[in-house]
Image: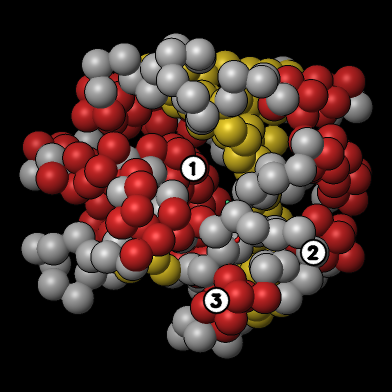
Amino acid sequence: MLSYQHAYHAGNFADVHKHLTLHAVIDHLLRKASPISFVDTHAGRGLYPLDASETQRLAEYRQGVLPLWEARLDLSDEPLLASWLEAITGVQPDPQRLVHYPGSPWWLGQRLRRDDRLKLFELHPGEHDYLARQALADNVRHIHADGLAGLLASLPAATPRLCVLIDPSYERKAEYAEVADCVLSAMRKARHGVALVWYPLLPAGRHHELLERLRDGGLRKVWRSELTLHEPGEERGMYGSGMLVVNPPWGLGERLATAMARVTPLLGQASRYRADWWVEE
Ligand code: SAM
């Protein structure tokens, strides 16, 4: 039963964390010429109009992308944030107004080179219909299917390099274990691939199962970052956003730390960012 729709949360602080990390990883990977296969296992709609009724209902982007957008002139001296905000400006019909927030298919697809490829998996029929209506380049495929099974069936990749984003909605408790098992299997087939895995920080702490299963499964070089809005238990619901990067590009942690030091004050006084190696080399 799929009920999650990302439009209710588009542009929130977790999207900022996830897409800024993704943007930085892609930036590093594109420094080398060899082609890359990108896989987005849980693609969502692709582009989110912020005035959609779903998005306006919670208006989470007001404590996410909006304060960064409003501070974009002040942030223009921070290279990663400047290029991320410039990319967002590029999808607005009027560069002075923030009316769309781009989802992961856009972040992954906008800088593809001729020999790179991108597969977008989306299982929800309605969400897949939105995705299928997006203008996508010839080397992008959208597939109405389960993303974890789709990823494993796509390996080994046809290109020398691989970059995967796994961004489930975690509607089912079992998804934490399923994601971990999928990452372990995928990395056995693509040892040098880069995998980004997003997880929510919720008071129930279910993300520990994902983290521990990856460590106990023998995975190495797992870097973790977490962005929190407040302490757990202060309010109901998600208090933070987590990202794992398996085989992170060199220098990623420093670049994100510098950018995040400018982001957290804009998300509220209690917002914090931290990063470390979950499993070292
Ligand atoms: N990655 C998107 C982004 O950053 O813009 C947001 C994705 S949203 C968090 C999760 C999406 O996964 C939802 O659109 C949901 O319909 C879809 N989904 C849920 N289970 C899935 C599965 N097994 N395979 C593929 N997509 C799935």
The image shows residue 150, relative to residue 187, as above or below, that is below
Separation of residues labelled 3 and 1 (CA atoms): 19 Å
Which residue matches tag 3? 131
Residue sitting at x 31%, y 41%? 64
Decide: few, some or many residues near mark 2? Use Cα within 10 Å; few <14, some 14-19, many ≥20. Answer: some
Q: How far across and down, in percent of the image, does residue 146 sit?
A: 79, 64
The C terminus, quarter of image: top right
Q: Which of marks 3 and 1 is nearer the N terminus?
A: 1
Disc 2 C-beta below 8 A from ligand 1? yes
Q: Which amino acid does label 2 sit on?
A: Asp
Separation of residues labelled 2 and 1 (CA atoms): 21 Å
Name the secondary structure under disc 1: helix
Which residue matches tag 1? 18
Q: How far across and down, in percent of the image, does residue 277 sit?
A: 63, 18
Q: Which of 149 and 59 is in front in this view?
A: 59
Q: How many labels does the image show?
A: 3
The image shows residue 81, relative to residue 124, as above or below, that is above
Q: Which of marks 3 and 2 is nearer the N terminus?
A: 3
Which residue matches tag 2? 146
Is residue 277 visible from the viewing direction of this image?
yes
Q: Earlier in the sequence, mark 2 or mark 1?
A: 1
Q: Which amino acid does label 3 sit on?
A: Leu
Q: What residue type is labelled 1?
A: Lys
